[in-house]
């Protein structure tokens, strides 16, 4: 009787583990699309019209469970010299790991290429949601990758610390 109980508990643990894995890696993601004008960069100095990034071969995923789960890959023919002169580079951007099945987005490689200078990351949409910025990394050959990351305002407020002085007022739900 003890062996049957142990085997039943192991089978149950395996089923629950497989279900949890499915929920984390597959269940909440959905494909997203983009249209002309959806991928933009604010221009420097601030106040001008955003720079619209032309793109092809867009693939994107997002999840309702977290604003940090957005990932996208695309190709562009934007001029890298114009980009460097008009957009705000983010020297310390770090891409988030994407699910293995979303094979166009390799966060480890993108991160290494950002550190080595083979790619450059730019701020796309600051405070997309409070404390969350959209970041785009560009390669000279025209590849582009998008992800969301927590900005300093979000990091402070999400850790229940006061927002730094240059941050917008946090929403009531975060105070």
Image (tube, rainbow, N blue to C red):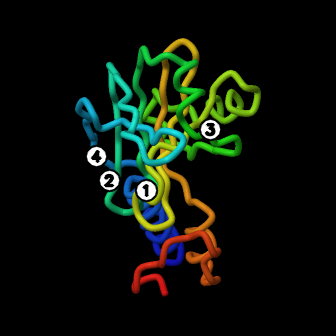
Instruction: Identify which residue is drawn at 41% across, 19% down.
Output: 75
Q: Nearer the viewer, mark 1 or mark 3?
A: 3
Question: Which disc, if any, is residue 14?
Answer: none
Q: Would you call the spot at circle 4 few (<14 residues within 10 Å), some (14-19), or many (20 or more)?
A: few
Nearer to the camera, 48 or 11: 48
Q: Residue at x 34, y 22 (%)?
A: 55
Q: What mark, if any, has residue 27 been given in the picture?
A: 2
- In the picture of the structure, the residue carrying the numbered disc 4 is 30
Q: Residue furthest right?
A: 116
Q: Is residue 119 above or below residue 64?
A: above
Q: Are marks 2 and 1 in contact (CB under 8 Å)?
A: yes
Q: CA distance from mark 2 to mark 1?
A: 7 Å
Residue 159: quarter of image = bottom right
Mark 3 → mark 2, Cα distance in angstroms = 34 Å
* Point 56% across, 75% down: residue: 158
Q: Position of residue 115 (x, y in %)?
A: 74, 33
Q: Which mark is residue 24?
A: 1
Q: Mark 3 touching mark 2, by CB under 8 A? A: no
Mark 1 vs mark 3, CA separation in Å: 32 Å
Dot 2: few (<14), some (14–19), or many (≥20) neighbours within 10 Å? few
- Whether tag 4 and tag 3 are in contact, CB under 8 A, the answer is no
Q: Position of residue 118 (x, y in %)?
A: 68, 21
Residue receiving disc 3:
89
């Amino acid at each position: 009787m003890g062996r049957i109980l142990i085997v039943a508990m192991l089978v149950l643990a395996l089923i629950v583990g497989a279900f949890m894995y499915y929920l984390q890696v597959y269940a909440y993601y959905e494909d997203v699309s983009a249209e002309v004008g959806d991928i933009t960069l604010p221009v420097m100095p601030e106040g001008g019209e955003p720079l619209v990034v032309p793109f092809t071969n867009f693939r994107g995923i997002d999840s309702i469970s977290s604003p940090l789960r957005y990932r996208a890959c695309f190709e562009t023919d934007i001029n890298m010299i114009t980009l460097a002169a008009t957009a705000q580079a983010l020297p310390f951007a770090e891409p988030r790991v994407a699910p293995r099945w979303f094979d166009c987005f390799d966060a480890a490689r993108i991160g290494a290429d950002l550190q080595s200078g083979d790619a450059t990351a730019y701020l796309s949409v600051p405070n997309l949601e409070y404390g969350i910025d959209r970041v785009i990394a560009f390669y000279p050959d025209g590849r582009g990758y998008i992800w969301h990351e927590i900005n300093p305002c979000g990091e402070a407020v999400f850790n229940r610390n006061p927002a730094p002085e240059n941050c917008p007022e946090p929403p009531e739900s975060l105070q």
